Image (cartoon, rainbow, N blue to C red):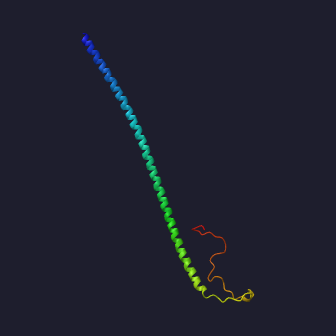
């Protein structure tokens, strides 16, 4: 009978050890699951942050491209205006070759009354005052 009680005691101890081991494994598994869940939340937050940053960069890139296109258009317009001005200067230089004869000094304006030409030929299109260009605000 002692042998049976001893054997039963050993079985009970083994079962208790097994139960303790299983409980520790369950706790460890629960801890690992919680850690995995936390890591998944962190990963989701990081992915969301990366996605939002990507969207912001796309919007910034689009606005920079629009600004660049606007500046390129303005540059082309300025270049065309510069060409027109250059042609006007050349035309005025050619016209200036046939200047009216200069009068001797000291005769004054009274001698020239009615003989002076207008400073510019053509129609006056704008008044003499400070104005801003509607497109370039200069």
**Residue 13 pos. (x, y %):** 31, 18
Closer-to-camera residue (83/66)? 83
Q: Quadrant of the N terminus?
A: top left
Q: Give me the residue at 46% from left, 50% from top.
A: 53
Residue ID at (31%, 23%):
18
Q: Residue furthest top?
A: 1
Rendering coords of residue 19 (x, y %): 33, 23
Does 94 sit left or right of 6 as displayed? right
Q: State the count of labels.
A: 0
Residue 109 occupies which quadrant of the picture?
bottom right
At horizontal 38% and vertical 37% (from top left) the residue drawn is: 36
User: In the visual, does 8 lie left or right of 30?
Assistant: left
Rendering coords of residue 81 (x, y %): 54, 74
54 sits to left or right of 83: left
Give residue 97's quadrant in the image.
bottom right
**Above or below — where is 121 with respect to 134?**
below
- Residue 129 against residue 98 in the figure, above or below: above
Question: Residue 46: x percent and y percent?
Answer: 43, 45
Q: Quadrant of the C terminus?
A: bottom right
Along the line of sight, the residue nearer the viewer: 112 or 106? 106
Q: Residue at x 32, y 22 (%)?
A: 17
């Amino acid at each position: 009978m002692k042998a049976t009680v001893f054997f039963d005691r050993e079985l009970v101890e083994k079962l208790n050890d097994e139960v303790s081991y299983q409980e520790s494994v369950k706790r460890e598994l629960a801890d690992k699951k919680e850690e995995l869940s936390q890591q998944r939340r962190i990963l989701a937050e990081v992915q969301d942050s990366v996605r939002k940053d990507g969207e912001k960069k796309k919007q910034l890139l689009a606005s920079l491209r629009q600004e660049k296109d606007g500046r390129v258009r303005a540059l082309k317009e300025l270049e065309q205006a510069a060409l027109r001005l250059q042609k006007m200067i050349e035309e005025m230089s050619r016209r200036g070759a046939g200047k009216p004869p200069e009068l001797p000094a000291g005769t004054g304006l009274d001698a020239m009354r009615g003989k002076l030409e207008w400073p510019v030929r053509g129609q006056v299109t704008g008044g003499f005052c400070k104005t801003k260009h509607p497109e370039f605000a200069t």
